Image (spheres, rainbow, N blue to C red):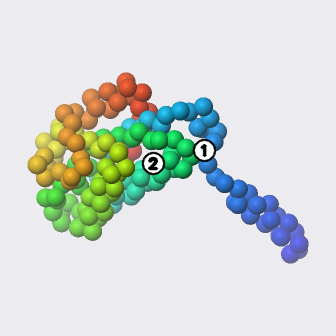
Amino acid sequence: MATVVLAIAMPLSAQAAAPVDDTAALAGVEEAKGVFQIDFTEAEKTAFYLEIIRGTHANFVRQGLEPDLVIVFIGPTVQFLTTEAGDDVADPATLMRIESEVARLAELGVRLEVCAVATEVFGVDNDTLFDGLDLTGDGFVSMIGWQAQGYHPVTMF
């Protein structure tokens, strides 16, 4: 019986050793243009997905494409993007993670936009937004504009 288990396990481990990439999806792709719309109600989820987007950027680079990415923050997420967020909004450690990820993504050349409609609705002072963030008039207009310029939308909720 042990021989049977070993025979089954060997092909599985051999498959795991093969490089995992996006060769099929990226066949013939010459540019990696994407626009992410982020509309979260939880700071932890915001921090997590900013880390994931940074990983996506790295995966494009690893596979030979220079990513051209934009993130558009709308809705209640804007409450997590300010130096004035209180403990009632999220715990300080999570807010620091978000601020750190914003800085890292900005350093990579990712454009990060914050919807001014959302900052008004949620009472966020635009002058307190983290460094690396650009204010845009309307997140929905921005999403439509980026898509019209050939950026592929990724909606996150």
Q: CA distance from mark 2 to mark 1?
A: 13 Å
Q: Nearer the viewer, residue 149 or 10?
A: 149
Q: Is residue 9 left or right of residue 79?
A: right
Quarter of image, res 95 = bottom left
- Look at the image and tell me whether residue 107 can be seen: yes
Residue at the spot of label 1: 22
SS state under label 2: helix
Residue at the spot of label 2: 57
Q: Judge the density around disc 2: few (<14), some (14-19), many (≥20) Cα neighbours within 10 Å.
A: many
Instruction: Say what amino acid the circle numbered 2 marks.
Output: His
- Look at the image and tell me whether residue 12 can be seen: no
Residue 9 in the image: x percent, y percent? 79, 66
Residue at image position (32%, 32%) is: 143
Quick check: 97 above or below 107? below
**Does label 2 or label 1 sit earlier along the sequence?**
1
Residue at image position (73%, 57%) is: 15
Residue at image position (19%, 33%) is: 137
Residue extending furthest toward the bottom: 2
Residue at image position (60%, 31%) is: 28
Instruction: Say what amino acid the circle numbered 1 marks.
Output: Asp
Q: Is residue 41 left or right of residue 117?
A: right
Residue 97 in the image: x percent, y percent? 31, 63
SS state under label 1: loop
